[in-house]
Image (tube, rainbow, N blue to C red):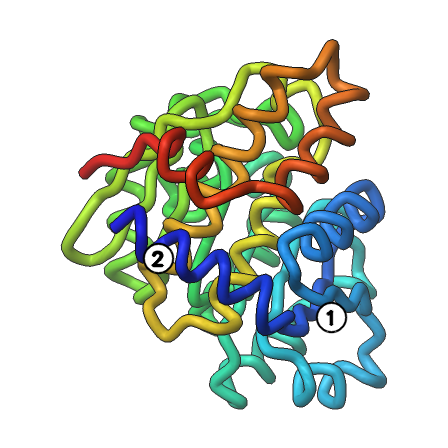
Amino acid sequence: MDKKIWELISSVRQSSPLILNITNYVVMNNSANALLSIGASPIMSHAITEMEEMLRIANALVINIGTLDENWSKSMLLGAELAMQMDKPWILDPVGAGSTTYRSNISDQLLQFNPTIIRGNASEIMALAKYHNGNTKGVDSCNNSLDAISAAQYLNNKYSSIVCISGEVDIIVSMNDIYYLKNGHALMTKVTGLGCSQSAILGGMIAISKDVILAALAGMALLGVAGELAAAKSAGPGSLQLNLLDKLYNLTESEFIQTIQLSK
């Protein structure tokens, strides 16, 4: 499986898929640079007027509700609806779901368009599934990723979405399997928007792979492995941001295979 994951990562570098991102102000630069570093081509656009044209040329869509407002929500809902109609793969990153009624309502509406992959922290995943013991602190999780497995299984069963739970242990939930990734580094929690970058990277993987589980594993593993290796030579959050982009760009097969910690 590790070899197949690397082959997909390499394919993204070679094919440069076009990823349409309706994302938030905080992470636009981070997400765009992460996509460029893995070999994908980002578009950061949220205009309703051009949404259909953009989606026709894009290979995948990433929706991130971080800086949500009334205008952006319309773009997101239209984008998700068009992606479903065009059979384009799309990622939902429900940032802060459960923290306000508005975020929860928009997330619920987006779910009706059957995202290919849902990625969030434990509290966000639990909020989507209406598991009321999920707690958020703003956009941060107050729950362990293991706490959200049942919620992820519920979402997978209801919407046929692969669900990725980010945390100290990253968990990927499909209909038949649960995968655990034990990569990453505590320093990554001190850099804003790395989860959002991970969702963007997932978009890069799903853009060229019909195997959604493989794409989910590749996207989650790539950031975890690169972050772990980058953190090892970083003095703090500032240098980590630079080193992470470099490692996403320069990561070798041998580094990846030696570092990935994937299990069922």
Q: Nearer the viewer, residue 199 or 223?
A: 223
Query: Callout 2, which amino acid?
Result: Ile
- Foreground tag (2 vs 1): 2
Query: Callout 1, which amino acid?
Result: Lys
SS class of the residue under badge 2? strand
The outermost residue toward the left is 176
* Mark linked to residue 131: none
The quadrant holding residue 186 is top right
In the picture, measured across the screen, residue 182 lies left or right of residue 226, that is left
The location of residue 162, given as percent across then percent down, is 35, 57
* Mark linked to residue 74: 1
The location of residue 29, given as percent across then percent down, is 83, 47
**Between disc 2 and disc 1, whose residue precedes?**
1
What residue is drawn where x is 71% and y is 23%?
Answer: 240
Q: Are marks 2 and 1 in contact (CB under 8 Å)?
A: no
Q: What residue did someone put label 2 on?
A: 162
Distance of mark 2 from mark 1, alpha carbons?
24 Å
* Number of numbered discs on residues: 2
Note whether residue 133 is visible: no
Q: Is residue 115 above or below residue 252?
A: below
The location of residue 111, given as percent across then percent down, is 47, 64
**Crowd around label 2: few <14 · some 14–19 · many ≥20 (10 Å):** many
**Crowd around label 1: few <14 · some 14–19 · many ≥20 (10 Å):** some
In the picture, measured across the screen, residue 193 lies left or right of residue 136, that is right
The quadrant holding residue 180 is top left
Note whether residue 188 is visible: yes
What residue is drawn where x is 37% and y is 75%?
Answer: 210
What residue is drawn where x is 48% and y is 56%?
Answer: 9
The location of residue 221, given as percent across then percent down, is 43, 41
The quadrant holding residue 195 is top right
What residue is drawn where x is 46% and y is 70%?
Answer: 112
SS class of the residue under badge 1? helix
